[in-house]
Image (cartoon, rainbow, N blue to C red):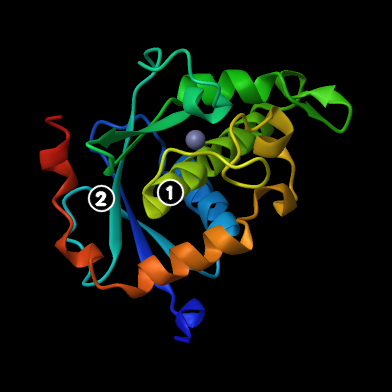
């Protein structure tokens, strides 16, 4: 039995140059992704032109507020972020919609009030958390190399507004089976050979 669970892999989130995300939003997004994925992944953000660290996973994050192509998807988080599969393989580009994240968060209740009634700074902070958690879900699809959903936890379809905004991440856990599969995959030295995400945008 290999002790793979103790390895920490770096997840580099490369922010596309045209992405409509402020520096403040980006740092809050990274914190939200880290809160879900620690201790398996150490999440860092890099501008898109940064080369991949050896052994790191590098995903390009871009923004697009147009309706997602798979509008029939039952995956609520698909409205906020999505990742394409080509020939069964997840592509290393995660697209997020800041507008739809903002709209979803504004309808959520926090301390008995709708978020849109709260100070703008609170809404922006929660929007970053929602985007971060939607990205965290897509990272799960990427690492599991599967578009499949589970009934509970991070990989269930249809994350509710409260899952995107509440402080506690207990409802965003991986199952022990998913965790074991991912730990095994992270221990395999295949990530360094991944194609550059820029090239995959051509798909
Ligand atoms: Zn999903």
Residue 132, given in percent of the width and then of the height, sits at: 52, 43
Mark carried by residue 185:
none
Q: CA distance from mark 1 to mark 2?
A: 18 Å
Which quarter of the picture shows residue 161? Answer: top right
Task: Provide residue 142's location: percent of width, then percent of height.
Answer: 37, 48
Q: Which residue is mark 2?
A: 47
- As drawn, 101 above or below 167: above
Q: Residue at x 44, y 42 (%)?
A: 138
Residue furthest to the front: 1
The answer to which of 10 and 1 lies nearer the viewer is 1
Q: Quadrant for residue 193, please give it.
A: bottom left
Q: Is residue 65 left or right of residue 174?
A: left
Q: Residue at x 52, y 38 (%)?
A: 134
Indicate yes or no: mark 1 CB to ligand 1 under 8 Å.
no
Secondary structure found at label 2: strand
Q: Are marks 1 and 2 in contact (CB under 8 Å)?
A: no
> Helix, strand, or loop for circle 1?
helix
- 194 up-or-down from 165: above or below: below
**Residue 156, percent from left and from top:** 61, 39
Q: Nearer the viewer, mark 1 or mark 2?
A: 1
Q: Quadrant of the C terminus?
A: top left
Mark 2 near ligand 1 (CB under 8 Å)?
no
Which residue is found at the position 14% from the left and 52% from the top?
A: 195
Q: Is residue 42 left or right of residue 114?
A: left
Residue on which disc 1 sits:
139
Residue 89: x, y in percent?
27, 43
Locate residue 102: give its quadrant.
top right
Whether residue 138 is visible here, answered yes or no, is yes
Q: Earlier in the sequence, mark 1 or mark 2?
A: 2
**Crowd tier of the residue under label 1, counting other residues whose Cα lies within 10 Å: few below 14, some 14–19, many 20 or above:** many
Q: Residues within 10 Å of mark 2 (few under 14, many from 20)?
A: some
Task: Let me know if residue 41 appears in the view.
Answer: no
């Amino acid at each position: 039995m290999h002790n793979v669970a103790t390895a920490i892999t770096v997840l580099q989130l490369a922010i596309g140059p045209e992405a409509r995300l402020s520096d403040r939003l980006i740092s809050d997004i990274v914190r939200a992704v880290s809160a879900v994925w620690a201790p398996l992944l150490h999440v860092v953000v890099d501008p898109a032109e940064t080369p991949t660290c050896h052994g790191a996973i590098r995903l390009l994050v871009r923004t697009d507020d147009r309706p997602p192509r798979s509008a029939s998807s039952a995956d609520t988080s698909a409205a906020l972020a999505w990742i394409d599969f080509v020939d069964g393989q997840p592509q290393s580009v995660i697209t997020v919609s800041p507008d739809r994240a903002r709209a979803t968060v504004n309808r959520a209740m926090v301390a008995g009030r709708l978020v849109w009634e709260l100070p703008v700074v609170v809404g922006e902070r929660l929007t970053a958390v929602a985007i971060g958690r939607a990205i965290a879900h897509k990272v799960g699809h990427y690492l599991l190399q599967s578009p499949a959903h589970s009934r509970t936890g991070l990989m269930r379809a249809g994350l509710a507004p409260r899952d995107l905004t509440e402080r506690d991440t207990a409802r965003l856990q991986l199952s022990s089976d998913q965790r074991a599969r991912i730990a095994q995959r992270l221990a395999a030295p295949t990530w360094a050979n991944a194609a550059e995400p820029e090239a995959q945008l051509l798909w």
